[in-house]
Amino acid sequence: MAAMAWADKRAVLVLPVILALAGCAIGPNLSKQMSAYVGRPESALIAGLGPPKQKIEAGDTTYFIYDRIWRTYVPGYTGGPLFVDQRPSLGGITPNVPGRTYYDTCRIGFAVRDRVVRSVALRGDHC
């Protein structure tokens, strides 16, 4: 078997470090973050997330509703002709594509009974 080149050895040594750091940078997903409030007092929930958007009383349970909204802007494009030799004088067009803003939402509901968070539910396209 041929000896590994120095670049190959370096890649083998560096790749696990990069993967480990990438895992740290991403962190827990939203579901795990919100599940951390289950079993904690209502005051910890409000201290961590602020006052809820909505509170619903149903019997001995209060539901705290939060909405998370992520805004993503995709810039538009105003540029040259669509194809290499399509000059406007030859009938080519210059595209003008406007930018767009996209909103992704997640509704988070906590069930609170006896001032303790009992459960959490996430609904939406970005949970």
Image (spheres, rainbow, N blue to C red):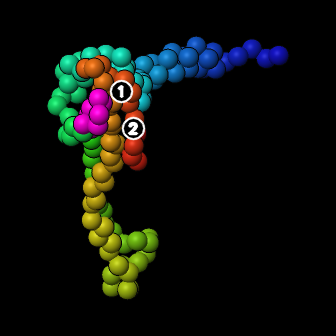
Which residue shows up at 64% across the image and 20% down it? 8
Query: Looking at the image, which residue is at 29% across and 70% down?
Result: 96
Left or right: 122, with 70 as reference point: right
Quadrant assignment for the C terminus: top left
Q: Is residue 41 depicted above or below 92 in this figure?
A: above
- Name the residue rendered at 17%, 31% in the picture: 51
Furthest-front residue in this view:
59
Quadrant of the image occupied by residue 43 = top left
**Amino acid type, residue under disc 1 in the picture:** Met
x and y percent of residue 84 in the render? 44, 70
Residue ID for mark 2: 122
Quadrant (top left, top right, bottom left, bottom right) of the N terminus:
top right
In the image, residue 11 lies at what x, y percent? 58, 20
Label 2 crowd bin: few (<14), some (14–19), many (20+), radius 10 Å: some
Q: Do the residues labelled 2 and 1 touch (CB within 8 Å)?
A: yes
The question of residue 64 being in magenta is answered with: yes
| Residue position marked by numbered label 1 in the rendering | 34
Label 1 CA crowd tier, 10 Å (few <14, some 14–19, many 20+): some
72 versus 59 height, above or below? below
Residue 88: horizontal and vertical position, in percent? 33, 81
Q: Which of marks 2 and 1 is nearer the N terminus?
A: 1
Residue 63 appears in the rendering: no
Whether 74 is among the magenta residues is no
Boundaries of the magenta span: 57-65
Total numbered labels: 2
> Helix, strand, or loop for circle 1?
helix
Observer-nearest of 47 and 116: 116
- Main SS type for the magenta part? strand
Foreground pick, 117 / 24: 117
Q: Answer above or below: position of 110 versus 103.
A: above
